[in-house]
Image (cartoon, rainbow, N blue to C red):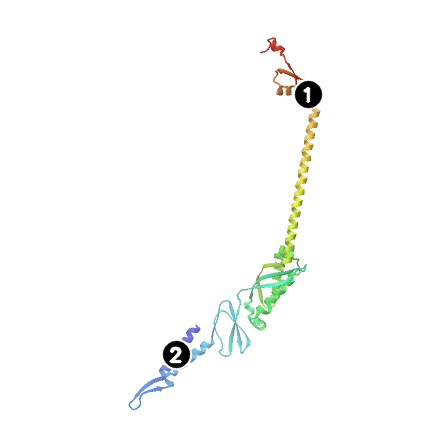
Amino acid sequence: MGYLLFIAFVAFLLLGIWRATAITLSVHEGRKLDFNLSRGLPFFAISALIFVFWLSFTTIDAGYRGVVLRFGALTGRTLEPGPHLIIPVFETVKPISVQVQVEKLDSQAASHDLQVVHTQVTLAYYQDPCCVTDIWAKLNDDALDRVVIPAIQEAIKAQTAQFDAEQLIAQRTLVRNGIEQYVHDRLTAHHIDVDAVSITDFNFSEDYNRAIEAKVTAQQNALKAENDLNRIKIEAEQKVTQAQAEAKALEVQKQQITPELIELRTIEMMQSRWDGRLPDVYMAGNGSNALPMIDVLKAAGKVK
């Protein structure tokens, strides 16, 4: 819209100049340039009105609010997105963003156990659209450097000091909630709302990282030793149980042994180891004297 007004202003101005300027022909003087303001006055008047209207016209983009100032002083007027008219020369408009803005900040603080912790926090915030006039009056459109960054730094230091280094990792959500609540309480007084707070990184000193690694290794070794001890204990208990079972079985067998059972087991053993045939030779002494064995039943023709 502003460009169209400017083009219209230039067009009517040139048209007025063209209408006010005339070239006349004279016998003695020849061609003569004649400028008569009255001929172009209507066009000059229209161009002047367009120029004033152009200076009075302003546009507020979506996601912004306009603070109207009159010679630098607040008028109390807040302009919504869209076209507006102001008093030219006397009034100016300062656009204030009410969109969600994201700020990343790295901060160094000490934990409860005096470990140095480097923390990176991402804050999403926005300025209250209803209070942009107060925000301009107090912060002059410099909320980030004046209140947002200091609030984040103070919140990180305050929350980090309440936890040990290990707790900062184990209770990350609790730490984040504490930072968010702290920042919210600080910024609300300045009409700035917190959309979200995220802890994107925790980083400790090299010495502490090595100490944590050594501690984890020691815990793993202790756990392995405990597991090995439990395994040995279980194996020993299994052996004792097995021995007790075998002893109990032997005791039961011992109670069941009778002379008849012994005789039966002897016969069964002899049957499994002897086929009923007598040896052909009997070795006596050291084996140098061999005596032939005579099968009487076979010799008598009783058996084949």
In the rendered view of the protein, which quadrant contains the N terminus? bottom left
Residue under numbered circle 2 = 12
Q: Amino acid at mark 2?
A: Phe
**Residue 161 location in percent, x, y?**
66, 61
Nearer the observer, 223 or 1: 223
22, 293: nearer the viewer = 293
Looking at the image, is 56 positioned above or below residue 250? Answer: below
Q: Position of residue 46 (x, y in %)?
A: 40, 79
Residue at x 64%, y 21% (from the top left corner): 269
Pick the residue in front: 4 or 303. Answer: 303
Where is mark 1, residue-wise? 262
Mark 1, secondary structure of its residue: helix
Q: Residues within 10 Å of mark 1 (few under 14, many from 20)?
A: few
In the image: residue 258, left or right of residue 100: right
* Residue positioned 70% across, 25% down in the render: 254
Three-letter code, disc 1 = Ile
Location of the C terminus by quadrant is: top right
Q: How many marks?
A: 2
Q: Toward which corner of the image does residue 154 lie, by quadrant?
A: bottom right
**Residue in the foreground of this view, choosing between 217 and 158:** 217
Mark nearer the N terminus (1 vs 2): 2
Question: What is the quadrant of residue 264 in the picture?
Answer: top right
Point out residue 55 in the picture as x, y percentages from the top left corner. 46, 77
C-alpha separation, residue under disc 1 versus residue under disc 2:
139 Å
